[in-house]
Amino acid sequence: MKPFLDQNFLLQSKTAEHLYHEYAAGMPIIDYHCHLDPAQIANNINFANLTDIWLRGDHYKWRAMRANGINEQYITGNKTDQEKFEKWAETVPYTLRNPLYHWTHLELQRYFDVHELLSPKTARSIYDECTAKLQTPEYDVQRMIEKMNVEVICTTDDPIDSLEHHQKVKQSGWKVKVFPTFRPDKAMNPDDVSALNDYINKLEAVSDTAINNYSDYLKALKSRHDYFAANGCKVSDHGLEQIYAADYSDHEITTIFNNILSGKPLQPIEALKFRSAMLYEFALWDHEKGWVQQYHLGALRNNNARAHREIGPDTGYDSIGDFSQAQALSRFLNKLDSTNQLAKTIIYNLNPGDNELFATMAGNFNNGTIIGKMQFGSAWWFLDQKQGMTDQINALSSMGLLSKLVGMLTDSRSFMSYPRHEYFRRLLCNLLATDIENGELPNDIEWTGKIVQDICYNNAKNYFDF
């Protein structure tokens, strides 16, 4: 019987151990998509306690606690941080086979050198030990990032964001590069016309542009796109149910935008045309600047109307959706490719039933000019766990070139999520080693090790040109 979470965790053969320890483990991390708060990085804060860094904002844990019958007061409510942590510790033993069980203990080990299992019996001692460490200089945010061998971080930022915190980090001379990512989802969402007009007013202010029509709107957004580029941005991102690629005319979009400015709610077809037009314009700008564009597709958000009303979005009430993806994705990519204006693109799938669809769709638009130009991105959100990662790797291996994958990303709001890169790397090494052990791949460890290092680091380094 193998011990739990030892140095050979997830590595099921000597070949896997060799690939991981000799080739993967030491590679730096390029976290090209996350939701870390740049202000906390720039100000190099120390978190108040273990709950503050670990539970606040983590809807993965919140979902598990609710399933375990924990009252909301101990999750997003007004109970003390210690009380909330104790309820999480009460939940952890019941998370067996949920990735949270692995992540929880990996994070305790890697950040705090705590090897005890978290339970009600150990909750107080672990809380006290980790909280005490969090008060020391070695556990400020920047030292914790350095501890995980992180080289690049790309945060997720709205076009109207000032980017002042990215500027502060750069001016500080800190060795880890922190870049913004252009995420204009709010700018193309007409579901709530009043909210969109509030956004337009804010955009006017930050861009110093009067927005009286659609042309003005594009001009203002383009100025922010340029501003992001001037501040080191090389990546855009969209979190969408599906790609929007309806046919439209310039006259239609002009009329639709005028209706938005007048506060008139849109018909569904009008909203679809508006989203389609905006998404296309953003893609053209990305290509013009040589950026990488990312599309996170397939989440069905805010399913619980009561919870959304009471505690808001991003609180653990989202799920995998079953949207039709292929035709619109094909139309969108083909429209850009037909004029040679398709930027380097990563498409991320949230529905495991669509893995092969995404893997083959990406392959339709490689053109031999850029290595790995079209990427079927690593498993994300509900799928960034053992089975989900394995399925994504297998689909890509079967339908494309795993060797050109740009590797893992955290897609996380937590500064304690970097062991997910380790998790991915261990799974990758074990899968390749299993094929070697089974005679399905040659026993060429040097070459396979090079492929591992490429996937873990080199491919991303070259692809994003960081």
Image: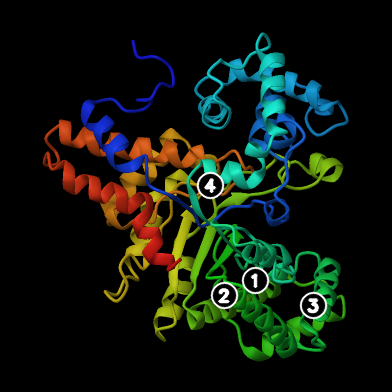
**Which dot marks residue 246?**
2
Query: Is disc 2 surrounded by few (<14), some (14 to 19) or many (20+) residues within 10 Å?
Result: some
Identified at 66% across, 78% down, the residue is 227
Q: How far apart are marks 2 and 4 (CA)?
A: 32 Å
- Whichever of labels 1 and 4 marks the residue nearer the N terminus, that label is 1
Q: Distance between the residues labelled 2 and 3?
A: 30 Å
| Mark 1, secondary structure of its residue | helix
Amino acid under disc 3:
Val
Which circle, 2 or 4, is nearer the viewer?
A: 4
Expressed as whole percent of the image width and height from the top left, the position of residue 441 reads: 14, 41
Q: Do the residues labelled 2 and 3 touch (CB within 8 Å)?
A: no
Residue topped by disc 4: 410
Could you tell which of marks 3 and 1 lies nearer the N-terminus?
3
Q: Mark 1 is on which residue type?
A: Leu
The x and y percentages for residue 118 are 61, 17
Tell me, for residue 206, which label it has, or none. 3
Mark before the other along the chain sequence, 2 or 3: 3
**Residue lying at 73% horizontally and 55% vertically, measured from the top left:** 39
Q: Is residue 221 left or right of residue 48?
A: left
Q: Do the residues labelled 1 and 2 touch (CB within 8 Å)?
A: yes
Q: Of circles 1 and 4, which is in front?
A: 4
Residue labelled with disc 1: 272
Please say whether residue 442 is visible from this viewpoint: yes
Q: Which of marks 1 and 2 is nearer the N terminus?
A: 2
Please indicate, yes or no, whether residue 68 appears anywhere in the rendered image: no
Depth-wise, is mark 3 or mark 1 nearer the camera? 3
